[in-house]
Image (cartoon, rainbow, N blue to C red):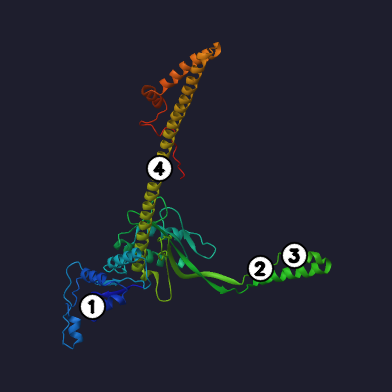
């Protein structure tokens, strides 16, 4: 729970022990404690003060100087966390604790319109199963409490709104249920009241129903035992559940990549009560907002990396597609050249042989083959290849013709 000190009390603490020791007690860094002192216009012991004091020098603690106009009269040290936290969470928590130091848990908070609407809806609500009433829907805080806790709920919410405002957060409720906003993200939350379990004392009516059922079973057993095997025995509950007056506030779950999720629930306990925890809850909200922003940035960066990897894969696939098309074209040309060379050899052989024994059909074949050879040779001339490559969209700006990227890869 947050510690609330007057400016003078905090000044006495600062001059009672080294800042490093005091920072550890508050679970703060030295830098954060120095910033809190600066925010509250509290001078610190000069360099070498504690060394001289340890050596036995008589040193006089100067009186606390008057504060500059506008300096808060109270210093709030929101509760810290002793366990190790991810750097992101620790940094956000420390910034929030510095911001909370100037506000404190305001005893008198200005009523907020959303809070007033929520309380009005609760007062008009019909009791639910455990004797609580609920507020749900657009424009109100999602809450479920007993009628006796409604006024206290208003105090808690208004103090929380004030503490959240010191962190730069605003309670808003437009088309959806009320939530806190920092301008970039929103944080959903709800408030509920727990239940106490007490041993149920059977009423006369319940006992009478049970006795009547038993008498009926006894009569059936005498006449027709099978009819006595009934499962409609009146049930007397073992426990009763009643509103406990212990309230809890729960925020949406926010994940931190590679670490535990920040705390998202705050509850009444024997010592700490929610109305005294506004600064602590607001600091917790700051941590949740920071974690939410970091998760959004992480996902955005992950998406950029995924898009870049997909782009590289597409470029590689496109290059393979182009190389395969070009290779196929070159292969076709080489195959044609090979066929032409074979045809030339065959024609030369036949021409030598036909000179010795000419025949009509072979002569006709030779004539046709020479024309065919000339036509095929013409197809491999630069002008013909240019026309072929243009028709096939090769060796130009459209070499990737027919390429279809894999959108799932």
Numbered disc 3: secondary structure: loop
Q: Position of residue 375 (x, y in %)?
A: 44, 18
In the rendered image of this protein, does residue 94 appear above or below residue 54? above
Q: Nearer the viewer, mark 1 or mark 2?
A: 1
Quadrant (top left/top right/bottom left/bottom right) for the N terminus: bottom left
Circle 2 crowding by C-alpha within 10 Å: few under 14, some 14–19, many from 20: few
User: In the figure, residue 180 lies in which quadrant?
Assistant: bottom left
Q: Find residue 254 and name its label.
A: none
Q: Residue at x 30, y 62 (%)?
A: 167
Within 10 Å of disc 1 (Cα), the crowding (few <14, some 14-19, many 20+) is many
Foreground label between 3 and 1 = 1
Residue 217 screen position, x and y as percent: 76, 68
Disc 1, SS: helix
**Closer to the camera in the image, 179 or 364:** 364
Q: Nearer the viewer, residue 404 or 240?
A: 404
Quadrant assignment, res 77 = bottom left
Mark 3 against mark 4, which lies toward the viewer? 4
197 sits to left or right of 88: right
From this view, report whether residue 315 is shown above or below residue 358: below
Disc sitting over residue 230 in the figure: 3
Q: Which residue is mark 4?
A: 316
Residue 14's disc is 1
Mark 3 nearby-residue class (10 Å; few <14, some 14–19, many ≥20): few
Distance CA(mark 3)–CA(mark 2): 13 Å
Determine whether label 3 and label 4 are within 8 Å by CB. no
Q: Residue furthest front?
A: 356
Residue farthest along the right direction in this orientation: 223
Q: CA distance from mark 4 to mark 2?
A: 73 Å
* Residue in front for this viewpoint, 329 or 65: 329
For disc 2, the marked residue is 235
């Amino acid at each position: 729970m947050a510690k609330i000190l007057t400016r003078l009390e905090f000044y006495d603490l600062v001059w009672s022990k080294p800042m490093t020791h005091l920072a550890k007690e508050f679970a703060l860094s030295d830098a954060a404690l120095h910033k809190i002192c600066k925010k509250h216009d509290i001078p610190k012991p000069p360099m070498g003060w504690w060394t001289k004091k340890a050596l036995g020098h008589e040193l006089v603690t100067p009186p606390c100087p008057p504060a500059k106009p506008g300096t808060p009269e109270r210093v709030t040290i929101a509760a810290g966390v002793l366990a190790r936290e991810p750097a992101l969470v620790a940094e956000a928590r420390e910034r929030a604790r510095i911001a909370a130091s100037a506000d404190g848990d305001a005893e008198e908070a200005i009523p907020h319109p959303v809070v007033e609407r929520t309380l009005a809806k609760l007062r008009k609500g019909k009791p639910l199963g455990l004797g609580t009433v609920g507020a749900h829907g657009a424009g109100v805080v999602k809450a479920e409490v007993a009628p006796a806790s409604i006024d206290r709920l208003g105090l808690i919410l208004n103090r929380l709104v004030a503490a959240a405002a010191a962190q730069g957060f605003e309670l808003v409720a437009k088309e959806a249920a009320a939530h806190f906003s920092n301008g970039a993200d929103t944080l959903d939350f709800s408030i509920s009241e727990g239940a106490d379990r007490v041993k149920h004392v059977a009423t006369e009516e319940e006992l009478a129903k049970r006795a009547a059922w038993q008498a009926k079973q006894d009569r059936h057993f005498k006449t027709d035992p099978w009819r006595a095997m009934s499962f409609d025995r009146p049930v007397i509950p073992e426990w009763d559940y009643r509103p406990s007056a212990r309230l809890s506030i729960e925020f949406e779950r926010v994940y931190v990549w590679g670490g535990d999720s920040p705390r998202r629930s705050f509850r009444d306990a024997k010592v700490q009560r929610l109305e005294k925890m506004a600064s602590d809850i607001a600091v917790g909200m700051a941590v949740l907002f920071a974690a939410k922003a970091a998760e959004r940035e992480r996902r955005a960066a992950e998406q950029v990396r995924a898009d870049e990897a997909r782009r590289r894969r597409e470029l590689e696939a496109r290059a393979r597609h182009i190389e395969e098309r070009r290779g196929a074209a070159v292969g076709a040309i080489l195959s044609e050249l090979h066929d032409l060379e074979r045809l030339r050899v065959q024609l030369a052989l036949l021409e030598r042989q036909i000179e010795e024994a000419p025949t009509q059909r072979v002569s006709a074949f030779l004539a046709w083959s020479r024309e065919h050879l000339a036509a095929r040779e013409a197809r491999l001339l630069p002008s013909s290849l240019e026309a072929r490559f243009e028709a096939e969209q090769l060796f130009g700006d459209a070499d990737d013709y027919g390429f279809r990227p894999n959108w799932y890869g």
